[in-house]
Amino acid sequence: AGIGLNLELGNWKLRYNYADAGMNDNIVKPLTDALLTISPLWPETTNIVQEMDTKGKSIIYHELGAAYDNNIWWAQAEAALLSSDTLLGPNGRLFYLSIGRRFGAVSIYGLCGYSRPDKDAPIFTAPAGYPSPLSDLLAMLANAATFSVAGVNQEQDSVGVGARWDFRPKMAIKFQVDKFDIEKSGTNLWVRSGPAQFTENQTSTVISLSMDVLF
């Protein structure tokens, strides 16, 4: 459920959006079931499972945006807040700003953005003192829980430049280059090729060429 408000004043546009999304399933049930199985050996897992469970939990979204356009210069910005009552739900602050100028049919622009979690993801440590292979199993489940929680965080900065050519009415070509600095514990916006959690911060450069067509 949600609501959106929009206001236009001359060259300005303002908007506010609110959404409350409920989750109807436990998306990590195999992991939480495994953690409950070892609760006699690791009593803390009972609390971990309660905090990780997603069934019946919700995600709250607030977004405030503003845009200015006088047909020569344009700028737009957006700030958002995400919160959830489960460790596996997103939380944090997101912001971006884009400024551009038109030269006839060609526009050039720059943009920047950041995303920060409101709280650091917890690191779960299995109890010590158990013999192998039991200790290995406990460590594996602790790492799986830590990785699952850390995987929902978004923590990164980005800058970019681009150009757009409206070569025909309702048709445009856009070229853009973006550079991203990604924290090792905030990679949720990126596809990871392996199961292991990143141990170092990441940097990525994205170059895109696209054509927009409005029917």
Image (cartoon, rainbow, N blue to C red):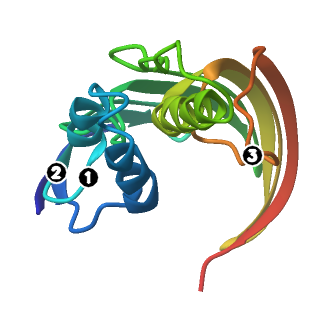
| Alpha carbon separation for disc pair 2 and 1 | 5 Å
**Amino acid bearing label 1:** Thr
Mark 3 or 2, nearer chain start: 2
The correct choice, above or below, for 171 with respect to 66 in the image is below
Q: Residue at x 42, y 14 (%)?
A: 120
Percent x, y of residue 64: 25, 34
Characterize the local packing of mark 1: few (<14), some (14-19) or many (20 or more) Cα atoms within 10 angstroms: many
Instruction: Looking at the picture, tell me which residue is in the foreground, 135 or 91.
Output: 135
Residue that lies at the very extreme toward the bottom in this rendered image? 215
Q: Which residue is mark 3?
A: 104
Instruction: Looking at the picture, tell me which residue is in the foreground, 64 or 36.
Output: 36
The answer to whether marks 2 and 1 mark residues whose Cβ atoms lie closer than 8 Å is yes
Q: Is residue 103 visible?
A: yes
Q: Residue at x 26, y 52 (%)?
A: 54
Characterize the local packing of mark 3: few (<14), some (14-19) or many (20 or more) Cα atoms within 10 angstroms: few
Percent x, y of residue 52: 30, 41
- The mark found on residue 57 in the picture is 2
Q: Quadrant of residue 67?
A: top left
Question: Horizontal placement of 123 versus 6: left or right?
Answer: right
